Image: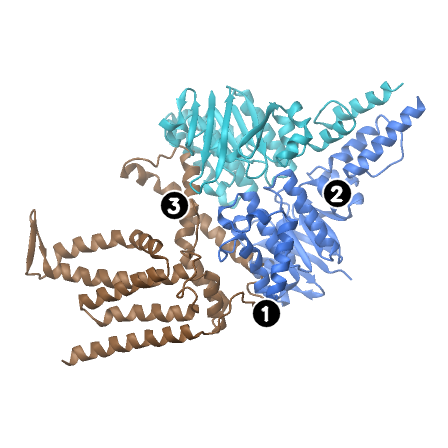
Chain colours: A blue, B cyan, C brown
Amino acid sequence: MALVELKDLSFKYQLADEFALKRINLKIEEGDFYAIVGANGSGKSSLCYAIRGFIPHFHRGDFSGEVLVADQSNSQRKLGEIGLDVGFVFQNPFSQISGVAMNVYEEVSFGLENLGVAKEMIAHRVEEIMTLLEIEHLRQRNPYNLSGGEQQKVAIASVMVMEPRILILDEPTSQLDPVGTEQVFKAIELMKNRGMTIILVEHKMELISYFANKVAVLKNGELLLDGPIQDVFTSPVFAHSQIKPPVYVEVNSELKKHFDYCCEEVLTHEQCTALLHSLKQRSAIEK
Amino acid sequence: MINVTELVYRYPTGFDALRGINLQIDHGEKVAIIGQNGAGKSSLVKHFNGLLKPTSGDVTINGVNTKEKTTAQLSRWVGYVFQNPDDQLFKNSIREELLFGPRQLSTDQVKIDEIVLEIAHLTGLESSLDKNPYDLSLSDRKFVSIASVLTMDQDVVILDEPTAGQSDDKIALLESIVNYLQEKGKTIIVIAHDMEFVAKNFTRVIVLSGGKILMDDSADRVFAQPEKLRQSQLRPPHITRLCLEFGLPVCFNVPEFVEAFVNSCCKRS
Amino acid sequence: MVCLLTFYEQKRSWFADLNPITKLYFVGVMFLIPFLTDNLLILTSYFLLILALAYSSKIFNRFCNTLTRIILPLLILLFIMQSLLYPGGEKIICQIWFMSVKQEGVIFASTIGLRLLIVIGSILVFLITTHPKDMIMALEQKGVPSAIGYIVLSTMQIIPHMEMMSKRILDAQKSRGVEVEGNIWVRAKAYLPVVVPLILSSIAQLENKVMALECRAFNAPVKKTSMVDFTLTGADRFVRIIVILILVAAVVGRVASLWL
């Protein structure tokens, strides 16, 4: 029984001409690390809003179909209630700053205070998440004085620390440098290992193929493909998605023009180097 | 063209953003500035159009010291596209937005109309000229703000993280814009975190870290030094990492890598 | 530039440590008592009381700087207008060119000015010594919905927030050739390219902000943890009594002055 289920979901924003989401049917199991990919404007953020309940509670428009989270329909629950199950990190870090915190430490604690978590637990969890995302050095800084990338990490920390059952992240690394990006992905992986279900909108395919286990591809508001990573990225339908698969998929198909070997899924750096090493050994032996 | 001498910049909060930068960028160069969050990239390029004035040291544009001019005056030569388009857009239609900048600089309406059409075509906005910018998605609005600076036809164009949050098709559009600017002989300066985009499109890469220049060299040489890049929280492009792991010459695209790999396998005989 | 969205300064003092509601009692009384008297001496003493409070709360410099920044232009305008244009004034203090400075005008301006200083000064003392989260929490414990506390906070933040955003927008527009340095006409032309993005961005951001707060469980149907203890101390009770006594004395004084 899926933790999140979208049944025939369609939605058009009030002032829009086109539907942002068209008859989406999707199931997300508990413990999944589900990536949502697609070109800009394909409906990724809208899909996430629907799971969190912002569509239809906050964004009005033409809504049909059903969104079930933990077997309960979002349409029948209040936003505040859905929030106890579903955490959300938005794209824009600046507008996620609460405005009630004098420093980063208070900012990260804010969500836990609102959840009524005990004081001692708050201190423990905040320290842990700040260490994980390497933002301890920012603890006394005013959140508004940080750079965009630093603000993004603080926003992620502030939501992750709340340990929701389902964590949705909408392009959380768009402003981060490469190492910062990896730190965030590793932290997300840790959350997943603790039992959180992850829904991640991203453009960085190489990292998705390493960390995620399933992916949904959106195009013009429709669900083009969904399922396990290897099935989706190697599917011929993927070519219609307007986005590129991880670079290693291209390496694999290019190598096949020169070498004769069984179809192997090559989606990550590790898989690619393993393949290349074996091909090198094989050609050394053959010579 | 752009000369930076012993540039030091300290923010009013006391934070030392730039600690002695020496740099020269010539006409027509394509430069990418990369580095960790907080390394001083934006602080550096904001000196090129006078938004920031040096605490000590000098920045000259075409021989003119930026301390002697306002940003609006320098905007005749230096264009800056900010990361957030919503800080800029205020007209009712995209056409008006594109017309705004050039009208500050000149009164030749014929020439202005020509360039607006050209840039609209380049940035994929021709069919949206009569729309309100806020009717478009954030990703498309970024192109409106890029277009509204390009219509000013300045010698130097600075793009601050144009690739952030963009999907592959939009990045391809950005690449065609960079090519167009190069053909026109413009000096292009880009700040980016997308290493693939930087490696493929920029011949010169400057790496900043902690307010200083860590490396200033060709893309080939910069991305061949992963240890040094790590100092500024950076990584080489994915395909380059494969090159380095297999002892192959640094390259940035798949066909080149595979060819080099195949050759290296054949050489073993 | 240190960016603060509230006036709050993290300094501990006897006044800062009081329950926020107690401080609001103080503010409430300071709103009322200036309007119960016309006596300049009494009004001045009320203001001196506020200054003394600011001093003993270790926020004197901050208080004076902010108050001056907010009120000084207004006060100057008030004095000029009233001194020179007060209707029906007869006692002339001095002449400036063709205009005469009238004593009644000066007295009137002083009364209004002092009232302004007292009202705004007391709010300022409250804001500088109260952590915004504490204010929301204290109100919530009194039964006020957290949403209202947040609306109050956001309203207070509007001006500093816009100040912060307008700097970014100004930079973007300067880069497009909009000249902002110069005489008043030059700056007037820069108005529209700055104000329009400011308002549009603020509205868009407000929407995002509400959603983001929602995602910090602001409206969660659970009781919030308070990091601060809001039980009333002896100091709280003492201050509340004193403040009410001041109010009573002011009312009695007013009634008495009307009778006699």
Q: Which mark is residue C222?
A: 1
What's the amino acid at mark 3?
A: Val
The secondary element bearing badge 2 is classed as helix
* Residue A143 seen by the camera: yes
Observer-side mark, 3 or 1, equals: 1
The chain holding disc 1 is C
Q: Position of residue B214 (x, y in %)?
A: 59, 28
Q: For the point 83% across and 39% down, which residue is it?
A: A265
* Mark 3 surroundings: few (<14), some (14-19) or many (≥20) residues within 10 A: some
Question: Is residue B255 left or right of A39 when viewed as pictured?
Answer: right
- Front residue of this view, candidates B60 and B85: B60
Query: In what quadrant of the picture does the N terminus of chain C appear?
Result: top left
> Which residue does the numbered mark 2 point to in the structure image?
A209
The reply to whether callout 2 and callout 3 are in contact (CB within 8 Å) is: no
The chain holding disc 2 is A
Query: In what quadrant of the picture does the C terminus of chain C appear?
Result: bottom left
What's the amino acid at mark 1?
A: Val
Q: Position of residue A144 (x, y in %)?
A: 49, 49
The secondary element bearing badge 3 is classed as helix
* Residue A20 seen by the camera: no
Q: Which mark is residue C195?
A: 3
What's the amino acid at mark 2?
A: Ser
Of pointers 3 and 1, the one earlier in the residue sequence: 3
- Front residue of this view, candidates C226 and A268: C226
Q: Position of residue C28 (x, y in %)?
A: 34, 70
Location of residue A81 with respect to B164 vertically, above or below: below
Observer-side mark, 2 or 1, equals: 1
Cα distance between the residues tagged 2 and 3: 45 Å
Residue C84 image-quadrant placement: bottom left
The chain holding disc 3 is C
